[in-house]
Amino acid sequence: MSTIKQMEEIIAQFPPIRYDGSSERRDSLNNVAVNKDQQLEYVKQRLSMFLQMLDALDPEQAELEDIDRLIEMIDELEAKVEQVKK
């Protein structure tokens, strides 16, 4: 199993924040309102995890699939940042 896949399993333990159309977002597990500060903290945690994955990636053993997944994660982070800005 590649390092990226191992790290993704860890990241999968963090639930996504869903937007329900109100002025607040709600945590998908317990439906608790999440304010902008909490949303920003979530994005920071995801960015930190991404950077850990990047640091753990061995360039000699990295596969194209790993690089593609990193690019996909950057796109996901960008989308989350745009959600927080709204």
Image (cartoon, rainbow, N blue to C red):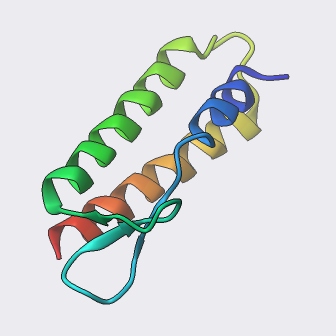
| Frontmost residue, 64 versus 52 | 52
Q: Residue at x 50, y 65 (%)?
A: 28
Q: Where, by quadrant of the figure, is residue 12 drawn? A: top right
Q: Nearer the viewer, residue 27 or 85?
A: 27
Q: Quadrant of residue 64?
A: top right
Hey, which residue is sitting farthest right in the picture?
Answer: 1
Does residue 61 appear left or right of residue 17 in this picture? right
Give the answer, above or below, for where 29 lies relative to 61: below
**Extreme-bottom residue of the structure:** 21
Residue displayed at 38% across by 84% down: 20
| Residue 42: x %, y % from top left | 32, 46
Quadrant of the image containing the N terminus: top right
Q: Is residue 80 above or below residue 60?
A: below
Image side of residue 23 versus residue 59, left or right: left
**Which is more toward the observer, 36 or 63?**
36
Residue 85 location, x and y as percent?
16, 68
Q: How many marks?
A: 0
**Residue at position x 67%, y 28% in the image:** 4
Q: x and y percent of residue 62 in the render?
A: 71, 21
Q: Is residue 66 above or below residue 62?
A: below
Residue 24: percent from the left, percent from the top? 23, 75
User: Which corner quadrant holds the C terminus?
Assistant: bottom left
